[in-house]
Amino acid sequence: MKKLFALLLALCMVFALAACGEEPAPEETGAPSTGEPSGEPVEAELNIMMSFPQFMDQWETYCDQFEQKMLEEENIKLTINLEMPSSGDYESVLQTRLTGDDAPDLFTLHSNNIATYYEAGHLTDLSNEPLAEKIYENVADMVTYDGKLLAVPIESQAWGPLYNKAIFEECGLEPPETLDELRNVVEVLEENGYTPFMLAFQEQWVPQLITALTLGGEVSGNLTDWVERMNAGEGSYTEMAEIFEVIDLIMEHGTDRAMETGAEAGAAAFANGEAAMFVQGTWASGTIMSTNPDMELGVFALPVNNDVGCTNINLSVSTTLAVHPSSDQMDLALKFANYVLDDEDSNALFEACSFNPLATCHTFEPASWVADANVYVEAGRSYKDLVLPTAVTDEQGRLLQEYYVGSVTADEMMARLDEVYAQAVSAAA
Amino acid sequence: MSKSKRTNLTLLLFCAPALIVYLVFKLIPAISGIGYAMTDWNGLSKDFDFVFLDNFIEVFSDKYFWQSVWFTFKYVAVMVVVANVVALLLAVAIESRRHGKGIYRTIYYMPNMISMVIGGYMWMFIFTQVLYYMADNWGFTFLDHSWIGDPRFSFWAIVIVSTWSMVGYLMIIYLAALQGVPADLIEAAELAGANSRQCFFKITLPMILPALTICVFWTLNSGFQVFDVIYSLTGGGPGRATQSVAMNIYEEAFRGNIRYGYATAKSTILFLIVMVITLIQLRVMKSREEEL
């Protein structure tokens, strides 16, 4: 008797562990919010999922404004459910929702994923919406696929490593243009008792930025067809061996305890002057400026070699907003998408989040570090962020962590990346 | 209906609520998962192809998967010993106290009630801030290690945090078992001249073997599925040095190439491994119990 009970208990426990990772049961989870009958002009609901919890307040305010606007103009009492999972988990949460037939009406996604999501039938064509006219052409390019405008760009960056202008000025330094100049900067900083680089490698997307910038630099001036050749299975990371000179320089002259420092902690330490440079993008400016409002933040282009032609700034569109085709509030969803680039209200939002201006309706003055980066862009010294398979991007970050702790060598890392790249290409085919 | 059948039915009815939940939410998805394991579904598309056993064949040459399996085995081996020894020690220590049993019981059980993700972040703060503060300001230089960044230390960091959270639960099971040991047996042994150590190893421990079976079973099980501690503490890093099987599967399904089909194949293999091991463990430990 006791045995039977124990056996049953044991069986239950064995089953309990079977479920890990095996949740794809699409039909079961769906509980879509049923639309109100159109005759009653009262209540409506919009579900929006976004990936930047750091701008929670700004977006909540913006959604409130939209609710207000709808009430006044359309006599619709709209309730917006704004969800903001942390950026690390965002994609997995979104994918679960999409496959579970529980898609949000609007959701953000990285511009690199537009093609995949479109092929899977999760994006609505926005080409004929009023917003399409307003977006700058070089930005619109990055959210267009198959000749259709598929998402509203929100975050666009012109970015490179950040530096502390006050420290540079004190040491009489200028932003470096070549690798030799960067070495000199490092040397002078160390002579003056400053740590050159802030290292915050705990989350793998931060070290990954170093490869994004160095590979991007090489591609912009040197190996312009590298990505195409990689996609065709004819390229190799060994062509990029040069980037390890910069990587080594950064890792050898950085702060201690890099693996214990997260992105936020790193930004705060950088703001407090613990290091002079930080390979992070302009998106970290929020944390930096709130930690130290007097910080003099600058942006420079990371040199990868001694060819100034490769020292360029990275131009990318990261977060974009898409409308899901199965939305049962399509009208409202499209209105919201248009409202994101509203002629009047969007200026305040973009300024509050320190996003870059990306449409003709944006008339605000960008922050000083954004203006810094724009100087490069206007001089034609910028390149479009490389679109690599996500698996490769992730692997770069992880391998850089391993490279930092010394469990992998540069040669092993390049061989491994070639392997992952080939796998990703064949998985996508 | 015979008497034994009737009691069996009664027992089954008592189990029914839990059993039904497990059937619907665990067993059925697990079985349908085997179907998905034979597809190349990417978790996003509406259509996918059957690839039959290709995924399973691919798993066998997946270096990182087996690396994570090896890590998980190491973790389970250490956890089964450490967690059970600590839990048993705590249970004996509390049981031998005259006063304040309730307070100690509550205190040691408390970590078990905190979500492991929160617990993980709390410990992250301890490992990355508090220990360094102590090392820098109080001269405790033996604490000045890369607790998260160096795989040698981060393994122990993970063990410490898991033990901290798991021990309370095991302790309760041991406490219940200890209270079931008849006092007259121990009294008789003491009269016969046995010291307290002999009493423990010759009488108490054999008497609580059923509890030990359950606790070892439970640590084995939860050990093989370890995810949240590692996720919140090291994220599997640096690189993949502290990646458990569950994390490897998660990564395959939700990160990078998003291969749901392949990830499901991996989890099916994990399921088989764990089932075999727990069945062996149950058989071995059960047979020892019956010798009593």
Image: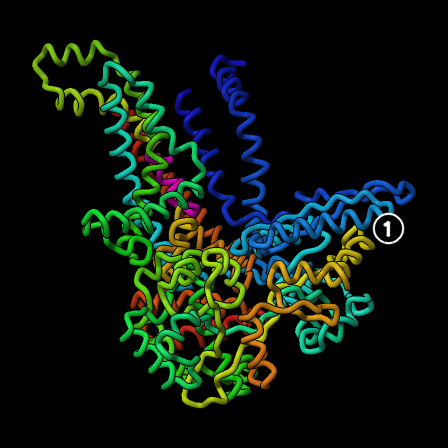
Q: Please tell me whether residue A345 belongs to the stretch shown in magenta.
A: no
Q: Which image quarter is the C terminus of chain A in?
A: bottom right
In this picture the colour scheme is rainbow
User: Measured along the vertical axis of the image, is residue B224 above or below residue B187?
Assistant: below
Q: Main secondary structure of the magenta part?
A: helix
Under circle 1, the secondary element is helix
Q: What's the residue type where badge 1 is placed?
A: Glu
- Percent across and percent down for residue A104 are 70, 51
Left or right: where does residue B112 sit relative to residue B264? left
Give the residue at x 46% y 42%: A17
Q: Which span is picked out in magenta?
A: B216-228
**Percent coordinates x, y for residue A258 in the rendering:** 34, 62
Name the foreground residue: B3 vs B257.
Answer: B257
**Residue under the image location 30 percent in, 48 percent down:** B157
- The image quadrant of residue A351 is bottom right
Question: Is A148 above or below relative to B123?
Answer: below
A27 or A152: nearer the eye? A152
Q: For mark 1, does the 10 Å Cα neighbourhood hold few (<14), some (14 to 19), or many (20 or more) residues?
A: few
Residue beneath label 1, please?
A: A73
The residue sitting at 7% across, 14% down in the picture is: B193
Q: Is residue A174 left or right of residue A71?
A: left
- Whether residue A385 appears in this view of the structure is no
Compared across the picture, whether B87 is left or right of A222 comes to: left
Q: Toward which corner of the image does residue B49 lie, by quadrant? A: bottom right
Q: Compared to A35, does B213 lie above or below? A: above
Q: Nearer the viewer, residue B155 or A130?
A: A130
- In the image, is A208 to the left or to the right of A317? left
